[in-house]
Amino acid sequence: MNPEERRGGPDRQRELILSAAVNLLAEAGPSGLSTRAVAAAAGVQTPTLYRLFADKDGLLDAVADFGFESYLAEKRAFETSDDPIDDLRRGWDVHVQFGLANPAIYTLMYGNAQPGRRPAAAAENRAIMRAMLERANAQGLLRVPVETATVAIEASTTGSVLLLLALPEQARHAGLIRPLRDIVLDAVTERTASRDDRSPIADRAQALLGIITPAGGTDPVTDAGFSVFEAGLLREWLARLEEAAQRSAGGSDPAQGGGAE
């Protein structure tokens, strides 16, 4: 029995190749994801890789789908509330959190878009979001057609996450793009759920976060004499204050797991 036969059948070989590719992607980025390197890491011959994935594009799509599975599992299990727009807001946050926690996989999924090519995981994620929008539309809550809202939300989430991922790791804060979430949802819906109940503390924390966000290579907080650590801590506190105020305004009890997580 040759070494490759000992690696198991096609399904097992496929799993080994995808696991090896995800590890290489995390270690070396997309440039290190050559078919030869992946095959060697998986312990299979390069022709086996081509037999299972057809070509490098097929491999990359499969790696993106494989890496996105945990995110999709969370989205499939997403519990809808009585407010479809609040569900869209929570869905946005889940998407952003996954992207920031998995930069290599996210960039592979959304950072190399080609006309006519969409990984299955990206298509499923879009379908889940569209279903949320269909539900909002059925309740008369959309200002625009469902397809227009789908494109607007997808473009703003993926574009903003990719922008954050281009920043140094310590500067990638979800709070920087949270105002965009509310702007986009306000633009495509008749109202933003829980907006009337929103705490003024949350609004002020969000406004101050926007003012002290680094821009143009300068940080207004460190320019005022604070250390980099103190600046980061201030932004973290404001983000946490905003989130706590939002939970309180929504009537959820974090101890009971009723937040936006």
Image (cartoon, rainbow, N blue to C red):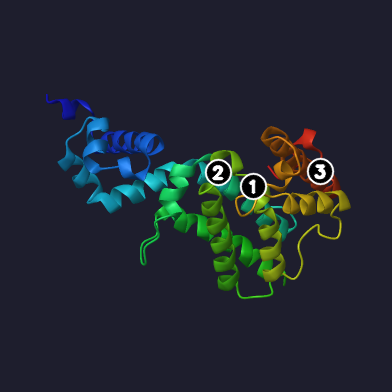
Q: Residue at x 43, y 51 (%)?
A: 109
Mark 3 or 1: the one toward you: 1
As drawn, which residue projects farthest toward the bottom?
A: 144
Circle 3 packing at 10 Å, graded few (<14), some (14-19), many (20+), is some
Say what secondary structure mark 3 lies in: loop
Task: Identify the image quadrant of the C terminus.
Answer: top right
Describe residue 61's horizontal placement relative to residue 239 as left or right. left
In the rendered structure, the answer to whether residue 4 lies left or right of residue 155 reads left
Q: Nearer the viewer, residue 94 or 210?
A: 210
Residue annotated with mark 1: 174
Q: How many marks?
A: 3
Q: Which tag, 2 or 3, sits closer to the chain's start?
A: 2
Secondary structure of the residue carrying numbered label 1: helix
Q: Residue at x 86, y 49 (%)?
A: 201
Q: Is residue 121 above or below residue 1?
A: below
Residue topped by disc 3? 252
The picture quadrant where one finds residue 5 is top left
Kindly indicate whether the residue at mark 2 contacts the one at mark 1 (C-beta within 8 angstroms). yes
Rate crowding at label 1 as few (under 14), some (14 to 19) or many (20 or more) other CA atoms within 10 Å: some
Q: Looking at the image, is 49 positioned above or below residue 140?
A: above
Q: Nearer the viewer, mark 2 or mark 3?
A: 2
Give the SS element for disc 2.
Answer: helix
Labelled disc at residue 100 = 2
Q: CA distance from mark 2 to mark 3?
A: 25 Å
